[in-house]
Amino acid sequence: MLNGIMARKTEAQRRRERAETRDAAQREYWPKFKARVEAVTDYHVAREVAEADIPPPDTPNRLFHTSLMFFLSSLRVPGQASQKELALYSGLMDRIAHQLKEGVAEKVKAELAAAIQERRDVGED
């Protein structure tokens, strides 16, 4: 309080608080999501996991699900996925490769590895 007037938060302070809240929610949710994906050995089950219990729009953990859905439907690297998500997808490709056309899993894994390295090079995660 300044001279009897409550100090207002700046936009930067509000953004920082929202980011901290989002990051905390993601840190809590990630181990559960990761464990569910790591247990998958079937492409169709992977899609079910991506679509199951999807958080509502504009919530921090929804991106984990939408990135996985994008990845499974296109077998392309999701632009907003983190290094740890891409590493999770790489492991998933190992487990579902038997359900894909020959050579597809290897191609996708190479693209994932390149994206992980690119994110590492720019200091993400």
Image (cartoon, rainbow, N blue to C red):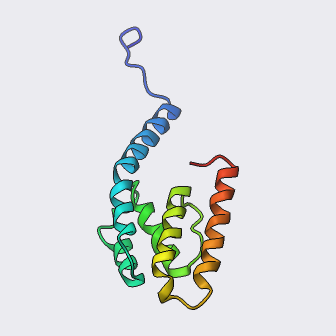
Residue depicted at x 60% and y 64% = 79
Residue 12, x across and y down, in percent: 53, 33
Q: Residue furthest bottom?
A: 101
Q: Nearer the viewer, residue 11 or 58?
A: 58
Residue placed most toward the observer, 62 or 68:
68
Which residue is found at the position 39% from the left and 47% from the top? 27
Of the pair 110 and 4, the residue shown nearer to us: 110
Residue 8 horizontal/vertical position (percent): 43, 25
The answer to which of 119 and 20 lies nearer the viewer is 119
Q: In terms of image quadrants, where is residue 116?
A: bottom right
Q: Is residue 72 left or right of residue 52?
A: right
| Residue 91 falls left or right of residue 115 | left
121 vs 17, left or right, is: right
- Classify 54 as above or below 123: below
Quick check: 53 left or right of 67? Answer: left
Q: Residue at x 39, y 68 (%)?
A: 37
Residue found at x 38% / y 84%:
44
